[in-house]
Amino acid sequence: MSVKKLFAGVAVAALAGTAALAQEGPIRIGVVTPISGTYAGIGQQVSWGLDMAAEEINAAGGIDGRQIELVYEDSEANPAVAVQKAEKLMTASDVDFLTGTVNSGATLAVGQVAERAGKLIATTVSFSDAITGSGCSPNVFRVNARAGQQSAALAVWLKRERPGTRVFYLGPDYEMGRSTVAAFRKNAESVGAESTDEVFAPLDAKDYSQYFGGIRAARPDVLYTSVAGNDTVRLFTQLKDFGLLDGLTVLGASGTVTSQNIGAIGDAAEGFITGVGYSTEIDTPENKAFVEAFNERNGVDPDLYGADSYGLLFAYKKAVEAAGSTNTDAVRTALEGLSWETPQGVKTIRAGDHQAIQPVYVVEVKDGAFTIADRIAGEDAIGEDVCDRF
């Protein structure tokens, strides 16, 4: 069965849309994502997911008869650059909606710009709890699992498999890294783990060995890390080369080891465990069809970034059609509380903080492949709504 048929209830356009709407031209969606730099592999998955969804929606008639046009800009995973490119998309390109931000700092910064400009943005990648927590905005949505959701799933596994374990933390030195470490540390300590120490490395670090003396001195049973992209390849390779992986269990954020970098990491990734909002191993007809179609189109399997980006456009389509326009206020209202079908199953956007509620999976790398070790219900992983701005 094709993925188009499985998502027919979402993807098939309302062809009875008014002629006036159809004559307004395409719905332009701005994508500010890293096309170059250390997170370029993540940006590639984002673009593959968005492009695939746009093609399917457009082939089925579009959104109320209007085609989707994606307009890309390279954020270079740099918040300052992302802001400049977002402003360009909102002014020169006159986009209706923004997405694509990867770096959590970029999402927070672009969210402020979008709010001032009266536009909506949704991230499909960024993990920082602040995005839908302390730094929440009425114009910002997140359809991927945040750091706290991933950490809640990992804590369940830690309590069962490694009770009373000693944990060392190593994250990238920016908003996402510090947020993910803080979220996991809180959850790990809540189930009895002992924290030893934490360090933060600059983005695109070339040499992680400077931190290895501290790891050895702490004598942890578990290393938690939230590095991503090419940084993961360097960290894991160096951990293996220096003999630190012997007897050490490595846990990490969901973007640490993905289908994009696992080949380059090789057997240094063996035994890695993470909490994720998506896995190709989700055993449903919908996900199997999605994986097959994604692989056929792009030559590789989707990872969480590709899957969440793909699902976003179906949420936006449903919201715009419910609102009857692309007006910011109307679409915002339609998105709040929205439920829609994705390769992961049904997601629901919590109205109070604009965070998607979804199942979270504990995934382990075995024999070079990802396997699902546990599933945590969305309601058990979501955590409390702490947004107080709307």
Image (cartoon, helix red, strand yellow):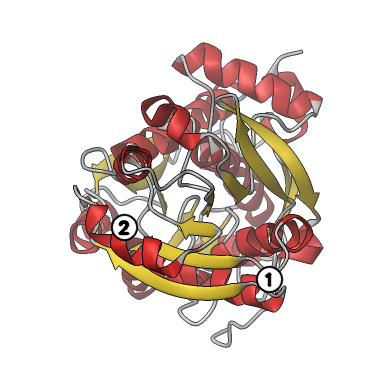
The residue located at (69%, 77%) in the rendering is 190
List the residue tagged with mark 2: 212
Please indicate, yes or no, whether residue 118 appears anywhere in the rendered image. no
Q: Position of residue 325 (x, y in %)?
A: 56, 53
Does the CB distance between marks 1 and 2 fall below 8 Å? Answer: no
| Nearer to us: label 1 or label 2 | 2
Q: Secondary structure at mark 1?
A: loop
Q: Amino acid at mark 1?
A: Ala
Checking the image for residue 351, the label placed there is 1
Which quadrant of the figure has residue 4? top right
Residue drawn 68% across and 33% down? 371
Residue 152 position in % (x across, y down): 68, 64
Q: Position of residue 205 (x, y in %)?
A: 21, 52
Q: Residue at x 51, y 54 (%)?
A: 253
Front-most of residues 323 and 40 = 40
Residue 62 lies left or right of residue 162; in this view the side is left
